[in-house]
Amino acid sequence: MTFTLDNRSQNKESSLTQALQQIQQLNSKIQELEQHHQDYVRSQQNLIPAIAEICISPIQEVQALRILIYRGEAACRQYLRSVLVKQSQASKMTTGQIEKPASTKRVKNQGFLQNSKK
């Protein structure tokens, strides 16, 4: 009789130990996922000032934000690079005009976009 009770208590302890280990593993995984999420949000938030400085029209800003939300950071950076290229080509075509002060912002953000490629 005591052997049966000892066996049952050992099985319960073993089950509890396994459950505790699984809980610890899940907590560890949750912390890891939370960190990845925070990093993701931070990287998206870092793009918002660049969007505001690079995009000339509100339509471009909306498009960039839509791309950021629906397709992610890499696609948004690619879109912003294409906007910079188009702006550069447009400024080359209009010779004789004085460049806008915003051009220094664009040059600064070109470096931002190139340095943050993944």
Image: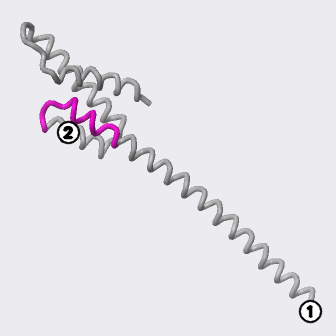
In the image, what residue occupies the spot 12% across and 20% down? 100
In the image, what residue occupies the spot 30% across and 41% down? 68
Pointer 1 with pointer 2, Cβ within 8 A: no
The amino acid at mark 1 is Met
Circle 1 packing at 10 Å, graded few (<14), some (14-19), many (20+), is few
SS at mark 1? loop
Residue 89 vs 35, above or below: the answer is above
Q: 12 or 27, which is in the foreground?
A: 27
Q: Which mark is residue 63?
A: 2
Give percent across and percent down for residue 93: 11, 11
**81 relative position to 56: left or right:** right
Task: Give the alpha-carbon distance from disc 1 to disc 2, as whole Å.
Answer: 75 Å
**62 relative position to 40: left or right:** left
Q: Which mark is residue 1?
A: 1
**2 relative position to 68: left or right:** right
Give percent across and percent down for residue 25: 64, 60
Circle 2 packing at 10 Å, graded few (<14), some (14-19), many (20+), is some
Q: Which is more N-terminal, label 2 or label 1?
A: 1
Residue 111, by quadrant, is top left
Give the residues drawn in magenta, as a range.
45-58
Which residue occupies the extreme bottom position in the image? 1
In the image, what residue occupies the spot 29% across and 26% down? 109
Q: Please tell me whether mark 1 or mark 2 is closer to you in this view.
A: 2
In the image, what residue occupies the spot 33% across and 43% down? 45
Give percent across and percent down for residue 38: 44, 49
